Every structure is written in C-alpha cells, then in structure tokens.
Amino acid sequence: MKKTIRDFDLKNKKVLIRCDFNVPIKDGKIIDDNRIVTSIPTIKHAIDGGSKVILFSHLGRVKTEEDKNKNDLSIVAKRLGELLNKEVLFVPETRGELLETTIDNMSYGDVVLIQNTRYEDLEGKKESGNDEELGKYWASLGDIFINDAFGTAHRAHASNVGIATYLPSGIGFLIEKELKELSLLDNPENPFIVVLGGSKVKDKINVIKNLVNKADKILIGGGMSYTFLKAKGVNIGTSILDEENIDFAKSIIEDYPDKIVLPIDVKVTKEFLNEAPYRVVNVTNILDDEMGLDLGDETIKCFNSILETAKVVFWNGPLGVYEFSNFAEGTKKVLEKASVIPAKVILGGGDIVAASTELGYKDKVTHASTGGGATLEYIEGKQLPGIVAIDDLV
Ligand code: AMP
C-alpha cells in the first residue's frame, strides 16, 4: 500500500503536486477540461490543509521552440482558477529566481502552477530522461511530494520519479481511485469477460497474454479483429491488417479456441468515409475491395449475450470506427449493454474512454480509466515507475 495525501499533515508545508493537465487544445482553447476537473479534489485537499500548493504538469511534447508556444501551460492556470474560484498564480518558467521568489512570497492556501515540465526536454530531455539534478532541484522547492498524474505513471520522469526520490511522498485521490478500481482486475471474479477493439493488434499483445488465462471469454472486434479473421483464413478484403502479428493471432486462436470470440458478421464499405454506401455481410462474404468498419447485428447480439453472463468486464478499444456515425453502432450497442448489466465494468486505455464519453456511457459504467498507456501497462501486469517511487505505508 502506498501513502496517500491523507497520510500527511499539510499545515504550513510546501506541497508539490504532479498533476496531469495534458488537456486537448484547439485554436488556443481547451476543448475538454476533464483532466483539470478530476485533479481538483487533491488540490482542494492541499489548499484546505493549509499548505502552499505548487503544481507541476506536462502539456504535449516539446521538441522545438515552436512547441513551447503551442504548449504553454498558462491556459490551464486560468481554467483551474475558474474551477477553484480562486486565483492561481502562474510562473512561466520551470526553474530560477522568479519561481523561487514566487513560492517564498506565497501565503499558505495559495496555489501556483509552474510552466510545462517538458520545456526541460528541449535541451537534453531533462524531464523525460529523469535528469537527477532537475529532480533534485524541483524537490528542493517543497517539503512533500504528491503524485496525482496517473496518465504518466508508466514513465520515469523528473517530475514524478525524480522528485519522489528526494522527498516524503504519497499519491493523490485520482491515482488512489485508479489503483482501487483497476485492482478489481488483479484477481477478477468469474465470469470475467474481456472486450478488445481498436486498430492494432500490436498494442494489445501483452494485454491478451496477461488476461487470457484469467478471462472466460475475450471478445475481439474493431480493426484488430481482421488480423484474427485473416489468421483463420478468412478473406478480409481491404480491412485493416496488422500483418506482422498474424502468427500471434493464429497461436492465440489455436491455444484458446473456446475463449476467443470473433465477429460473425460485419458492416463493410468500399471507402473509408462516413457517407460511403455499406452493407452487412457474414465475415465469409467480404469482397476483395471491401473493408469492415463496424460489427453486424449477429455479432452485436452474440457479444451482448456473453456480456450478460459477466461478473467483471474489462474493455479496451472501440468495436468499429466510432468517429463515423454510420459505423458507431457496434461500439454503441455493446456499451449500452455494458452499462446495464449487474457486472463491474472497467473501460481503459485511450479510445474506448473517448468513445464512451462521446456516446454518453462514460458515467454509466463502474470506472472509465484516465490512464491510456499507464492503464494498459497496469493491465499487462507491469509495475508503474511513477507509483513504485512513492513511499509505502508502513
Ligand atoms: P486504439 O487506439 O487501438 O484503441 O484504436 C482506436 C481507433 O481504431 C479508432 O480511431 C477507431 O476508429 C479505429 N478502428 C476501430 N475499428 C476499426 C476498423 N474496423 N477499421 C479501421 N479502424 C478502426
């Protein structure tokens, strides 16, 4: 068990919090502030505890001077101030006198956000390479370190592992909740049903390897299912194929014939376009110039009846090109089922959470994980360095 922010007396302390404010920005505006909103409980707890609250986050990648302008975190300070209904100071630098005097001059209960930690990547990848001197410097600015950025917990960076090395540390409420919900999958109750979709088999190999023995069934849809169908000798036309992983798909089908469930029928079209005419065909009737972009009704029925038996469900990846309204039906109807069954349903790893938000099911399941890569690495059974580095509760 890791220490949490609750395990510290925060009064008159300088508390460094690593948040994940990596929000999508378009035309100079934040288009989804969910990551800021979900950071608020930890930040409020530190304010109410009477500390100087010093926030760190990355935003995008910084490889050029131009990236710096694109990924300036001041926009987040403004939004955070609105959400907290309180002034949030912003220091447009990642180190130096201005930063140090700002912290010195803060009152307890004040909040400051430091510029994008990845500005430090421009010369020598100091943040992403977990530069020792940088981690030590940032740690010198505070008394306690709280990691609440689950999205980067699978990376050892200066702003998580680096700082944690030099300060008493704990996790924030967001990471605490992620670990609690995802731990349901460590020893899941059976029947345990896994739903996998998305485009590439490559990204899910380790997830399949780690879950195949625990799962009762693995339902495979979306782009990745065509590599499995190809491995069975089905003509998939121009559907997306992960050529390098056909052999892996073949071995999984051969080793676990009763566990792997593939589409029976699919919605095919000749062009990768929402408006393109489509038809629903049995998978054995895909023509050479057709590509599958969604599940057919038989498959939806089959997946949904298996879900009805579940006690625990883990789902990664959409079951079709959900961004196109004409090809979102499979993802939508299976999400709908997942939202009403009496099972614990965990969505995790990137696009399925975006799909569930867009299609209105995110709040109707047990947990929609915020982690992307971190969630997948957790599911793969890997240790997350950003969490390993945090002090254990003794
Ligand atoms: P992933 O990041 O692996 O979860 O993949 C998500 C992407 O897979 C989404 O952008 C979907 O549009 C895409 N996708 C799902 N099904 C298909 C399909 N049948 N053909 C092509 N792309 C797909």
Image: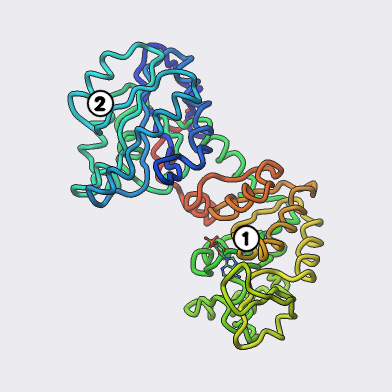
**Residue 122: x and y, percent?**
22, 47
Label 2 to label 1: alpha-carbon separation:
47 Å
Q: Which residue is mark 1?
A: 322
Q: Which residue is mark 2?
A: 140
Residue 144's label in the rendered image is none
Q: Label 2: how many residues lie within 10 Å, few (<14), some (14-19) or many (20+)?
A: some
Q: Earlier in the sequence, mark 2 or mark 1?
A: 2
Residue depicted at x 52% and y 68%: 200
Indicate the colouring scheme: rainbow
Camera-side residue of 134 and 223:
223
Number of marks present in the image shown: 2
Q: Secondary structure at mark 1?
A: loop
Residue depicted at x 62% and y 72%: 225
User: Ligand 1 lies in which image quarter?
Assistant: bottom right
Residue depicted at x 61% and y 78%: 291
**Residue 100 to residue 194: above or below:** above
Q: Secondary structure at mark 2?
A: loop
Position of 92 with respect to 32 (left or right) is: left
**Residue 152: x and y, percent?**
42, 45
Residue type, numbered disc 1: Tyr
Camera-side residue of 6 and 225:
225
**Residue 325: x and y, percent?**
65, 61
On whether ligand 1 comes within 8 Å of the CB at mark 1, the answer is yes
Residue depicted at x 23% and y 37%: 134
